[in-house]
Amino acid sequence: MERTTMDLWVGLFAAAGAAALIGLALKVGNLTTANIGDTYTVTAAFENIGGLKPRAPVKSAGVVVGRVDGIQFDSKTYEALVTIKVDKRFPFPKDTFANIYTAGLLGEQYIGLEAGGEPDALKNGDRIAHTQDAVVLEKMISNFLYNKASETNTKQQAE
Amino acid sequence: MFKKLFKPLFKKLDSVLRGVGHRIIDRLWRLGSGLRFFFYILLYSGESFRRIHLTIREIYFTGVMSLIIILVSAFFVGMVLALQGYNTLQRYGSSEAIGVLVALSLVRELGPVVTALLFAGRAGTAITAEIGLMKATEQLSAMEMMAVSPIARVVAPRFWAGVISMPLLAALFSMVGVLGGYMVAVPLIGVDSGAFWSQMQANVDFREDIINGVIKSCVFGVACTMIALFEGFDAPPTAEGVSRATTRTVVNSSLAVLALDFVMTSFMINV
């Protein structure tokens, strides 16, 4: 073997390429943050999930404790059934509240868990009973307008 | 009289149709021989892998020698993306999202595509010109005379060198581009460094974005190298023929890369 310098350069090139790929995976991508170790799965039913998507974060007190695993439609109750994976390190009581919040005014939606007071913790496969739907802007606006209109109507009638 | 009037018109129409038909048949012919060429390359790959130093030599010429142009352009592309992105994002008060913008556009699109375009211009033309000239100076016929298959000795090593080099170059392009964006966003503009990286990590998915980018660059590697090799192998053995083949390599590779990019993106993105 004589072309040692060329082999060296090719080796360096391959190593740099592999390093770039690993760098992309670890520094740019979510390979480190996506896998949150051991998890337990709970479900929650919502009447309206708004723009919630799979892989959306599940937060408690603003800290990411899990991720949305999947969203299905329950054709019996006409509700959205959301499967949530929560990190095993964070047990939540059975009467935990699951709310759908929006990050910022127009940001992406996430599930916020608010711990209740019961001593028993949620187990794998449990269902969160207390849920609060996503806020739909159009609904809020129409409610507001409807209330305003009925207010003015009653005022006029009183006069 | 009727016949007399229309005869030249028919003659004209006839020659036009002949020209169109000739072109279509010529394209189909080239497509078919290109596919045959591709199968021959795969068939002779085993033989060329046995002399792996040939492939390593070609990786040096196509991959390592393209590094400087790839890395420098990646750095500039990243910096321009950050500047342009900041200009728009700061109007909506979300200049921290600049990391996401730079990383996603590089990893998904610009990394593979710009690398492939630069590769076609830097390495593809060299391959075409080299093989075309080898053909013109009858080196390929001489090899055949010595019972050495030119496809195993000359073509297959260059093919695998291109296919191996392209994903590595694209990964380096994306990484250096992100670093270029960082250099503009954090020290120059003053975006918070932690927000830059954490927003990027929260929104760039390993499987959906990074692996798809790598798949794209592998496909571009096959397409660019195949086109360059075939144009060289198919070139008329004259000075004019080689120069035309080199031009065709750049034009066809660029078009193939952009068209394939659209097709693959439409499969990868769920609308």
Image: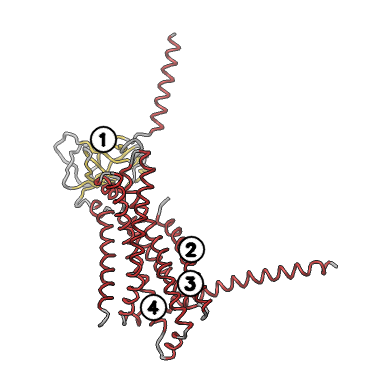
Q: Amino acid at mark 3?
A: Thr
Q: CB of mark 4 within 8 Å of CB of mark 2?
A: no
Pointer 4 and pointer 2 on the same chain: yes
Q: Amino acid at mark 2?
A: Leu
Q: Secondary structure at mark 3?
A: helix
In this rendering, would B127 be left or right of A3?
right
- Residue underneath mark 4: B156
Q: Where does the image place residue B120, in percent across and percent down from the top left?
A: 42, 67
CA separation in Å, label 2 and label 1 = 56 Å
CA separation in Å, label 2 and label 3 = 15 Å
- Residue underneath mark 3: B246
Q: Amino acid at mark 4?
A: Ala
Among the 4 quarters of the image, the one containing residue B224: bottom left
Q: Residue furthest top?
A: A159
Q: Residue at x 45, y 11 (%)?
A: A157
- Comparing B206 with B143, the one in front is B143
- Comparing A29 with B238, the one in front is B238
Pointer 2 and pointer 3 on the same chain: yes
Give the numbered dot on residue B255.
2
